[in-house]
Amino acid sequence: MALLRDVWDSHMLSNFGTFARRFEASAQAYLGTPRARAVASCDLGLVIGLAALDLPAGAEAIVPSFTFNSTINAVLWNRLTPVFADIDPQRLTLDPEGVRELIGPRTAVVVGTHVFGNPCDHDALRRAAGPLPIVYDAAHAYGSQYRGRSAGTLGDVEVFSFSGTKLITSAEGGLITASREELVTRIEYLRAYGFQTDYESHFAGLNGKMSELHAALGLLALESTEQAVRRRQEIAARYRHALDALPGISFQTVESSDRSTYKDFAILCDRRDDVERGLTAAGIQTKRYFRPAHTMRAYRTFATRPLPRTERVYSRILCLPIFNEIRDAEVDEVAARVSAQLRSRSRGGR
């Protein structure tokens, strides 16, 4: 409330004010890169980040189908053609070998998603992509690490989300990081109508400004990043310990050299529908996340090949409740209900 009063008293509610600049500086210090810029949302950030690469209209973008809709929408808003790739069924992220096989003369970019905060295998993707730029939808990954490197310092462009469902939230907001200064310059223009101070658009830009109200809230939340990530590690470990010995269940693989934020905690379960029904009956919310994009009405025209691992994962995946304030006893209750459902002797007991 004190910060909001400061914003109100400043009479500066937007236009890259004091709090937006402080938000950027805090994120830059945490990520270890000066090339981070705030935007109004992750969706706008993805559109702007791809636009900054200046890719030819109609070129192909290799993307996972196992991702949130925003990833595909950003590709289409940039007049690129999505080419759906399969995933690594353990990491649940883009499969580097699958990417290598899909690269052709029209391929202009590889777009990966750090799924649930688990970073893509960047080194393998870099080898597979060769000179092609790599863009990461890092919506879930503020606080994630890949082999000791912060998400946000991996791809040519990465975009974080600070919307209300994330570990760290500004209610709505995003952050773009870039690997090169020329990309940062283009991003600065593209998020501000295409101009800087002279009202002359150098590019066809957008209004991607983060408001001072959102920046103030985000600035407070950024201070608790490590605390939030540690708590998610504890919750995930508690779930894993309780569920690890159950038949027909497995988890997303997070390499020991990496760190996931566990924005979501997913189980892969042969009796997913039974578990889902049991938890729903007990008033416990779950999610089948992500619905494969290549099965959606808006994107089916681009579904030109089978994606068996994506479809298999989706048929088994269920995200259990996880949020920073969940109590250990609540985690134990969810795990106990999952265990009871899976240990039932027959499906007739559904």
Image (cartoon, grey):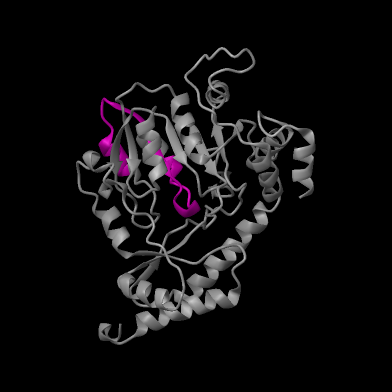
- The answer to whether residue 124 of the structure is visible from this angle is no
Q: Is residue 326 left or right of residue 5?
A: left
Q: Position of residue 165 (x, y in %)?
A: 53, 54
Q: Position of residue 223 (x, y in %)?
A: 71, 50
Task: Look at 35% across and 36% down and name the residue there.
Answer: 128
In this rendering, is residue 315 above or below 245?
above
Task: Look at 46% across and 35% down and name the residue there.
Answer: 46
Camera-nearest residue between 184 and 46: 46
Please give the range of residues in magenta: 97-124
Q: Position of residue 316 (x, y in %)?
A: 32, 65
Camera-nearest residue between 317 and 283: 283
Give yes or no for residue 108 being in the magenta stretch. yes
Give yes or no for residue 164 being in the magenta stretch. no
Camera-nearest residue between 165 and 346: 165
In this rendering, is residue 92 above or below 238?
above
Task: Look at 61% across and 57% down and name the residue there.
Answer: 229
